[in-house]
Amino acid sequence: MVMEEKLVINELEQGRELAKRLMSNLKDTSSIESSKNLISEILSIYQNAISRLRVNEDDKNILKRRSREIDDKDTRNIFKKRKISEKKTEKVSFIVGAGQEKGSIDDGYCWRKYGQKEIHGSINPRGYFRCTHRFTQKCLAVKQVQKSDTDPSIFEVKYVGSHTCNNNTTSPTKVDTVTEKQEDIVKPTKTEEAAMMMSLEDLESKKNIFRTFSFSNYEFENAGGGGGGWKGNNIFQENQLSPATTSGSGITSEILTAPVENSETADSYFSSLDNIIEFGQDWFWSCDI
DNA sequence: GGTATTTGACCAAA
DNA sequence: TTTGGTCAAATACC
């Protein structure tokens, strides 16, 4: 690990410890001054960490440029990564609720598994699914499901192509995707739409927050094979947002811890945090908390 | 027996 | 040559 990264981790750990102390302080209303000092320290530490990361990013960009120059001179020994498909895809991260590691994911459609592949650099294999009605109705929808390396409770699902079939599973809130004008993009069910936030090709963005779900009836790690794992009671259950950050296979999402009293909470929470970091503690103290 | 999953082989992209 | 995506025979389940 690079020295700079160690420093960042160290700073973030300090921040975490201070936040813990702050939390205990806040229980005691008499120590408001102490709490303010702690928050100032936390903000300062996070600011440092962010600055370091930004400097690192600049360094990486320089290295990338140099690397490209070298590539131009000699491309024979450099492995080129497969270009991302130009087809529009939709990537969604799902969190499987506690005790549901072998639970299921239902998105309102019937899927049939046609392959599984070990992915270079990933611990977990990627499952390949196509619409059950591929041959009967020439539905070309495909999806890829992979368990997150960093958090086994998270499934990363990539949809490719759109459903042209009429049939789907039992989801009563299913919307008709055929009528949608979004070519090549799978329209999620209304249940999903109401319950999650999706990101298109921009999952690196820190403001993309995924609402999370638990599933039933999805046999991702099919132990026994056979016997229709996709039919039955497909119930989406909305979970509380839980702290998790996933990365892997180029699919990255951030899921934020926040109370979900209403649907805007997570967004405003992140937005506030962002503002605090961007504008510093002066802004912070000028706000009513 | 019908249907779904598993898994090694094959192919194309980079 | 490596890797990701798909095919299809073998296998398992209902």
Image: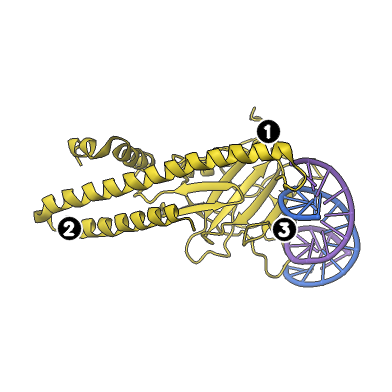
Chain colours: A yellow, B purple, C blue
Point out the residue furthest to the top here: A181
Q: Which residue is mark 1?
A: A178
Residue A74, percent from left and from top: 74, 41
Residue A261, labelled with which disc?
Answer: none
Amino acid marked by disc 3: Lys
- Relative height, residue A188 to residue A181 (above, below): below
Q: CA distance from mark 1 to mark 2?
A: 55 Å
What subunit carries mark 1?
Answer: A
Foreground disc of the pair 3, 1: 3
Query: Could you tell me which secondary element the residue under label 3 belongs to?
Result: strand
Foreground disc of the pair 1, 2: 2
Number of numbered discs visible in the structure rendering: 3
Q: Which residue is mark 3?
A: A117
Query: Do the residues at pointers 3 and 1 share their chain?
Result: yes
In the rendered image, is residue A239 in sight?
no
Query: Do the residues at pointers 3 and 2 share their chain?
Result: yes
User: Do the residues under discs 3 and 1 have CB atoms within 8 angstroms?
Assistant: no
Q: CA distance from mark 3 to mark 1?
A: 30 Å
Q: Quadrant of residue A118?
A: bottom right
Q: Quadrant of residue A112?
A: bottom right
In the rendered image, is residue A50 in sight?
yes
Query: Could you tell me which secondary element the residue under label 2 belongs to?
Result: helix
Residue A195, percent from left and from top: 47, 44
